[in-house]
Image: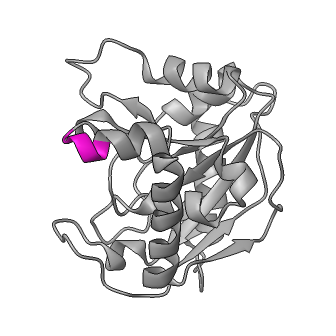
Amino acid sequence: MMASLVARAINLFVYLVTGVRARWLGCGPAATQRVYFANHASHGDFVLVWAVLPAILRLRTRPVAGADYWNRSALRRFIGAKVFHAVLIDRDPQSRTADPVAMMDAALAGGDSLIIFPEGTRNTGEAPLLPLKSGLFHLASRRPDIEYVPVWIENIGRVLPKGMLLPVPLLCSVSFGTPITLAAGETRDQFLARARAAMLSMRPHSTSEASST
């Protein structure tokens, strides 16, 4: 009951602060099992993606997030585990004891959908998108039957910049593109280039960067 109340409060807070709207450009909200892969500019990124999903989909959609951040306090642990049901990844290769791709694969095997950030870290620079890590390709190789939906989050980096404790009210949007799957014989670099282009193509007022990258 407590987790449900907190989830509703977070959802309301997100809408009040950001006025976030979903832009279903290449697909619609559906109960199909999916991996939503999005750009990463803020700790609030996955909350926006989670918030704009219909309530029935939120129940079975788990964000993949850094264990170091969400295990930092009792409150964060409660929200991460009980509200978002996050798949918590140790981002330090030297200390991790579990394979992140295997953890995501296990969540998919359990019937859940995922929200992931293939850049691997927050993008605080001028480039619209950092190079994508290979984990997205390895997950698609293990689970080629899953729909991989490109997502573009607009403005959240300005709402909650790195180092800021309080959000700045600003309109945000979350755009969902056409699902992609790993093609037969497609290499890692080919798949990641296609995934990157799909993400960039949904930027509001996008330039030709998606096609020239």
Residue 132 is at least partly visible in this image: no
Q: Where's the C terminus, which quadrant?
A: bottom right
Which residue sits furthest front? 1
Which residue sits furthest top? 97
Tell me where residue 53 sits by quadrant. bottom right
Q: Can you give x and y, in whole percent of width and height, for residue 40 in the image?
A: 42, 58
Q: Is residue 140 above or below residue 16?
A: above
User: Which is nearer the eye, 91 or 141?
Assistant: 91
Q: Can you give x and y, in whole percent of width and height, for residue 171 in the image?
A: 49, 87
**For residue 29, side relative to residue 206 (left or right):** right
Task: Name the dominant secondary structure of the magenta segment.
Answer: helix
User: Which is nearer the eye, 78 or 101?
Assistant: 78
Tell me where residue 27 sits by quadrant. bottom right
Q: Can you give x and y, in whole percent of width and height, for residue 49 in the image?
A: 57, 60
Instruction: Give the residues in magenta.
Output: 72-76
Q: Residue at x 72, y 28 (%)?
A: 111
User: Which is nearer the eye, 203 or 72?
Assistant: 72
**For residue 148, side relative to residue 5 (left or right):** right
Q: Residue at x 35, y 78 (%)?
A: 159
Q: Residue at x 28, y 67 (%)?
A: 125
Q: Is residue 100 above or below residue 26?
A: above
Which residue sits furthest left? 163
Q: Is residue 173 above or below residue 84?
A: below
